[in-house]
Image: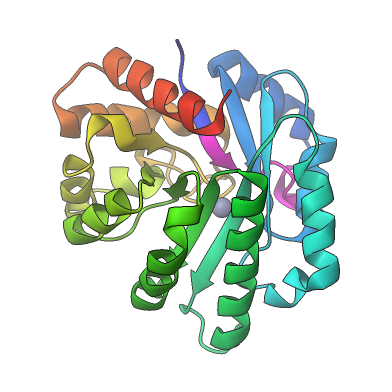
């Protein structure tokens, strides 16, 4: 079993020039990848790219909460019915950029999409930035009706790991866990049980250490896997087998 990338945005315009080549490198290096939507348009674009080895999640990011209105939810429901769509996401809260999107609107969009995921029996891919308390309060209410989820690009501490496990979530690490100053993040990774750990790139963002600053692509996920293997004190092959098995079970692939 090889590595997988559970979170990338190859629909991004940053891949417009060479998307086919990036996709080929991804599928040469990895078993499969999941394209993640962040708007209605990018969710549709992810679905348009579905093929062997390519899966998708559809959803509306907290920066575009107005899209998760009645009509938007209807469109997401239709997209989620397509074969190879394996999750609702990315959804969540983001309070990092003040006034980017009003918090009450973000929360409403988040709840509506959690309800959609529960209705469709699909796992959720969660985005959280500087919004941990409100996000946790909403998930405390909703988790019982969900069939699992991913705290993507994890940025919390060991205590927040515990909270995620309580919701029966998986915890996914991106390239930033490889950065020299990210010891706190590596300590959090240490606290994640092996059967809950996932690895991702969040391409085109957050390229891991040896290629840091470059446009990230799914094939770079191996650097993040190497760091996590070191953190866990195991061989990268074992890390690979376990994280891929985790992702397969969660997405029912
Ligand atoms: Zn993302």
- Residue 181 showing in the rendered view: no
Q: Residue at x 66, y 40 (%)?
A: 35
Please say if 85 is above or below 3: below
Which of the 4 image quadrants contains residue 85? top right
Please say if 26 is above or below 97: above
Whole-percent x and y of residue 142? 47, 63
Whole-percent x and y of residue 181? 22, 55
What's drawn in magenta, residue-wise? 6-16
Which of the 4 image quadrants contains residue 81? top right
Q: Quadrant of the N terminus?
A: top left
Q: Nearer the viewer, residue 165 or 90?
A: 165
Q: How many marks?
A: 0
Which of the 4 image quadrants contains residue 123? top right
Q: Is residue 213 left or right of residue 167?
A: right
Q: Quadrant of the C terminus?
A: top right
Q: Is residue 138 left or right of residue 194?
A: right
Q: Nearer the viewer, residue 117 or 10?
A: 117
Whole-percent x and y of residue 189? 23, 44
Q: Residue at x 17, y 30 (%)?
A: 232
Q: Residue furthest top?
A: 1
- Residue 75 showing in the rendered view: yes
* Residue 162 on the magenta span: no
Q: Residue at x 58, y 60 (%)?
A: 114
Q: Nearer the viewer, residue 249 or 224?
A: 249
Q: Residue at x 70, y 20 (%)?
A: 24
């Amino acid at each position: 079993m090889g590595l997988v990338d559970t979170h990338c945005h190859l629909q991004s315009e940053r891949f417009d020039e060479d998307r086919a080549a990036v996709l080929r490198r991804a599928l040469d290096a990895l078993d499969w990848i999941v394209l993640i939507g962040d708007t209605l348009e990018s969710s549709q674009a992810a679905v348009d790219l579905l093929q062997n080895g390519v899966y998708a999640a559809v959803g509306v990011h907290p920066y575009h909460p107005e899209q998760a209105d009645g009509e938007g939810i209807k469109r997401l429901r239709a997209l989620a019915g397509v074969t190879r769509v394996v999750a609702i996401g990315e959804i969540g809260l983001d309070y990092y950029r003040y006034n980017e999107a009003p918090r009450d609107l973000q929360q409403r969009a988040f709840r509506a999409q959690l309800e959609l995921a529960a209705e469709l029996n699909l796992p959720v891919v969660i985005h959280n930035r500087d919004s941990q308390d409100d996000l946790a309060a909403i998930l405390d209410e909703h988790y019982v009706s969900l069939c699992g989820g991913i705290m993507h690009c994890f940025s919390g501490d060991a205590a927040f790991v515990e909270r995620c496990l309580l919701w029966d979530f998986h915890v996914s690490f991106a390239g930033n866990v490889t950065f020299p100053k990210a010891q706190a993040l590596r300590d959090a990774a240490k606290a994640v049980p092996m059967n809950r750990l996932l690895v991702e790139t969040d391409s085109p963002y957050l390229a891991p250490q040896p290629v840091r600053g470059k446009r990230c692509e799914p094939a770079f996920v191996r650097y993040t896997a190497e760091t996590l293997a070191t953190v866990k004190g195991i061989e990268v092959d074992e890390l690979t087998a376990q994280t891929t098995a985790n992702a397969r079970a969660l997405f029912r692939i």
